[in-house]
Image: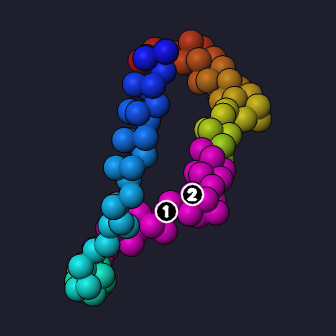
């Protein structure tokens, strides 16, 4: 039983210690100095660009344009069937004339 009474006594002491506590407050000039400092910080051009590029619409638009350009470049470098047939025909003609021409 002594243990319960000691426990209750400790709980009461802990709760009574909060009676004199008050809310913490900043000094009166703190907010004016904080606002003045926030306004005095100059924003660099790099941070402006980063803020613009961080927008989802801008970043997704750039990604879409990048993917379109990559697709165009990949598809434009593929050999076309007509060109390859023409090149084969021309190479056959050149080899025919080279082998059938009289040597000087």
Q: Residue furthest right?
A: 82
Q: In the depicted view, which residue is nearer to us: 40 or 93?
A: 40
Q: Quadrant of residue 45?
A: bottom left
Taking the image as shown, residue 44 lies to the left or right of residue 50, namely left
Q: In this view, does 89 lie above or below 41?
A: above
Q: Quadrant of residue 59?
A: bottom right
Residue 35 lies, with reference to residue 56, above or below; the image says below
Is residue 62 in sight in this rendering? no
Left or right of 92 on screen, residue 24: left
- Give residue 32's position: percent from left, percent from top: 27, 87
Q: Which residue is drawn at 59% across and 17% down?
A: 95
Residue shown at 45%/67% (left/top)?
Answer: 51
| Foreground residue among 74 and 28 | 28
Label 2 vs 1, first from the N-terminus? 1
User: Main SS of the magenta segment?
Assistant: helix
What colour scheme does the image use?
A: rainbow
Any part of residue 12 in sight = yes
Query: For numbered disc 2, what is the local secondary structure?
Result: helix
Q: Where is residue 87 in the image (x, y as percent from the top left)?
A: 65, 30
Residue 84 shown in magenta:
no
- Residue 40 drawn at (x, y percent): 23, 84
Return the residue nearer the eye: 45 or 72: 45
Q: In which quarter of the image is the C terminus?
A: top left
Residue holding disc 1:
53
| Marker count (numbered) | 2
Looking at the rendering, the stretch of residues picked out in magenta corresponds to: 43-70
Identify residue for label 2.
59
Q: Residue at coordinates 23% horizontally, 85% vertically from top-left?
A: 29
Compare residues 22 and 59 and report the one nearer the observer: 22
Relative to 89, does residue 80 appear above or below in the rendering? below
């Amino acid at each position: 039983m002594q243990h319960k009474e000691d426990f209750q006594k400790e709980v009461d002491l802990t709760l009574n210690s909060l009676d004199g506590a008050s809310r913490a407050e900043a000094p009166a000039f703190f907010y004016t100095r904080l606002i003045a400092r926030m306004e005095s910080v100059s924003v660099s051009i790099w941070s402006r660009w980063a803020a613009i590029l961080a927008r989802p619409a801008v970043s997704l638009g750039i990604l879409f344009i990048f993917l379109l350009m990559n697709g165009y470049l990949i598809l434009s470098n593929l050999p076309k069937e007509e060109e390859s047939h023409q090149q084969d025909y021309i190479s056959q003609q050149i080899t025919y004339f080279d082998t059938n021409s009289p040597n000087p």
